[in-house]
Image (spheres, rainbow, N blue to C red):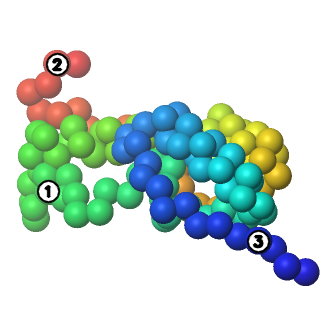
Amino acid sequence: MTTRAAVAQATPVLFDPAATLDVVADWSARAAEAGAELLVFPEAFIGGYPKGSTFGAVVGDRTVAGREQFRRYLEAAITVPGDECLRLGRIARQNGESPKSAVTTTTCDWQPAPTPGAAA
């Protein structure tokens, strides 16, 4: 059996899973038009891969800006199974493909500690 595969050299919308799924839908439609049955996205495409980010952390400390960046990163993680997974499945079925990507996920109700001095 032969499977025609495509690779999406796409950029996610960092910290915005819904907008990133719009990117997935666009790439998926184009790959399907080209005859792809399997579409591969970069690592942690949905949820984002914060390459080079330190989240403002150094040993023993984290900056306020770093805490805010990490909060946004955590909030962009998706729950598996969840609404984003359902949408991804609909996109795949619509285009007759099997999109593959690792996603940034959270399955717990843990929340980051409040930023010191921030309003509650």
User: Residue 109, percent across and down?
Assistant: 49, 38
Q: Report the disc number at residue 4.
A: 3
Q: Name the quadrant of the N terminus.
A: bottom right
Element type at marker 3? loop
Q: Position of residue 6 (x, y in %)?
A: 65, 67
Q: Nearer the viewer, mark 3 or mark 1?
A: 3
Residue 37's x, y, as percent?
A: 78, 63
Rounded to the nearest angstrom, the CA distance separating label 1 from label 2 is 21 Å
Residue where numbered disc 2 is placed: 119
* 44 w.r.t. 68: above or below: below
Q: Please, what secondary structure does the residue beneath circle 2 have?
A: loop
Q: Determine the residue located farthest toward the bottom in the rendered image.
A: 1
Q: Position of residue 2 (x, y in %)?
A: 85, 79
Using the numbered discs, state the Cα–Cα distance from disc 3 to disc 1 in whole angstroms.
43 Å
Quadrant (top left/top right/bottom left/bottom right) for the C terminus:
top left
Which of the 4 image quadrants contains residue 5? bottom right
In the figure, is residue 62 to the left or right of 28? Answer: left
Give yes or no for contact between labels 3 and 1 (Cβ–Cβ under 8 Å).
no
CA separation in Å, label 2 and label 3: 53 Å
Residue in view at x 10 percent, y 61 percent: 58
Which residue reaches farthest front?
34
Residue in the picture at 32% in, 38% down: 72
Residue that badge 1 annotates: 57
Q: For mark 2, does the 10 Å Cα neighbourhood hold few (<14), some (14 to 19), or many (20 or more) residues?
A: few
Amino acid on which the number 1 mark rests in the picture: Ala
